[in-house]
Amino acid sequence: MKLLLLYRRRWWLLYLPIVLSLGLLLAVVARVWDPLPPTRIVIGTGPAQSSYLQLARAYANRLEHLGLAVDIVTHPRPQDPLHRMVEGDPSIDVTFAQGLYAAQGNGVQALSVVGHEIIWVVARHSIEHIDQLRGKRIATSVQDSSNRLAANLLLAHLRINEHEVTLTNHVGDEAVAALASREVDAVVHVATGDSQTANALVRMDNVRILGIERAGALAAREPNLRAVIMPQGSIELRSNLPASDLPTMVTLTHLLVRPGLHPAVQRALLDVAGELHVMAGFLERQGVYPTTLGSDFAVSPTAQRHAQGQRPWMETLLPFRAAQWTQLWLFAVLPIMLLGGLLLWRAPRYIEWRVDAALQHFYGDLKFLEQDMSSITATDPAAMRAALSRLDFLERQVANMELPDRFADRWYTLREHLQHARDRLMALRNGAA
């Protein structure tokens, strides 16, 4: 390409491609390399009366203060959001699940264990021991529910076959009513200590809370269960409820996310979990939760780094949303802009380099010509004519060069050097004459 044309169209041929390349690089960085976290996430929970819905609302309130909008989607069963996440449904970002569902949770990741839920076994007062449930009617909710899963584990622990008991689908208020009306003999209910259903069951007349005998042995066989002691009077001291220390079982409650959820959102969820679950709960000591220790689900790499105190330093200085924008600008946009500024600043040097290369080419030819001239003698007219022919060719090429006006002085200097070489040849020829 002619140098003058390149110079005249430098905005289109140099600057515009640089600007477009920078814009494309910024778009790639913003969407692929370090995208900004979403402004809205979805938490899946169970039905309207579930404790997980109340927990999701507490998370939503805290997250909205950080600039994250939250949509809460309820489901007929508490485990339904987990099943949707396992199936790869990207519309559910976060959910809560008990460790009893760990075998069904392949493909999801745990951010933290945020508490535990007790396996409540409440029976009519005539039933004193859990192994007396053989031949009884037990309310355990529907198939695949946590109540049914826990009941099956307990029956297997007691070596009671399914055909030796009658399992009904009563759950919640229906289970309370069924036990009060003697429609069932016992209820197995998995819930936290502040569960309305659990509190209604243990405070009924003519019922008792059954301890789980050999709970440690059951916990040793079933990694998703933990053996704990429910102290005497821990539910209600005045009523001495329970009347004695009872061995029982708990299953851990997990905060789960889909694997592709943005790390910044995961850290925000972990921060909220630290605020909501740090206080002591029923049969929970203060500071035990949240934790990644003992998780029944695979722990997210982000949660592992968070547990080790690793997080972007910008998030320790600025609010959540401001920190994400600042990181994007500081580590992506600013370097690209500096690179772009450097390229735009050095772009004119490319034209200078092209001009230098062209002029150096002619100067090189002129140097070789002058070296040959030093060996020409006045008695060699053929060599003199050849040198003049080469010089004429160089002069025609230089005369046809189109350079920007800013390089005119260098062009005229080259012409002067060519003229000096011609004067030397003419003097040599005249001396021969």
Image (spheres, rainbow, N blue to C red):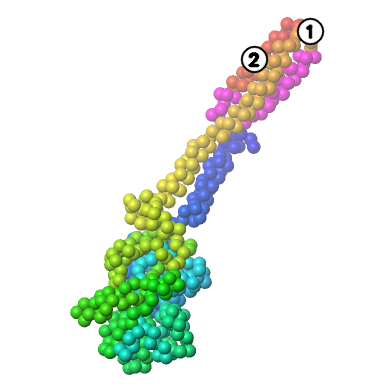
User: Which x, y percent locates residue 300?
Assistant: 45, 61
CA separation in Å, label 1 and label 2: 22 Å
Crowding at dot 2, Cα within 10 Å, few <14 / some 14-19 / many 20+, comes out as few
Quick check: 280 above or below 383? Answer: below
Q: Is residue 198 above or below residue 205?
A: above
Q: Nearer the viewer, residue 204 or 378?
A: 204
Where is residue 346 shown, x and y percent of the image? 51, 36
Question: Magenta segment range?
Answer: 382-411
Residue 397 horizontal/vertical position (percent) = 68, 27
Q: Secondary structure at mark 1?
A: loop
Residue at the disc numbered 1: 379
Three-letter amino acid code of the residue under disc 2: His
Q: Quadrant of the C terminus?
A: top right
Q: Check disc 1: other Cα within 10 Å, few if <14, some if 14-19, many if 20+.
A: few
- The single residue placed furthest to the left in the displayed view is 238
Residue 257 spot, x, y in % from top left: 44, 66
Q: Is residue 122 left or right of residue 151?
A: left
Q: Is residue 386 magenta?
A: yes
Q: Work out whether 27 lies above or below 297.
A: above
Q: Can residue 236 be seen in this snapshot?
A: no
* Residue 38 visible here: yes
**Residue 41 among magenta residues:** no
- Name the residue at 40% across, 90% down: 136
Q: Main secondary structure of the magenta part?
A: helix
Mark 2 element type: helix
Q: Which mark is residue 420?
A: 2
Relative to 202, 397 lies left or right: right
Quarter residue 181 falls in: bottom left
The residue that appears at 71% across and 21% down in the rendered structure is 392
Residue 177 in which image quadrant? bottom left
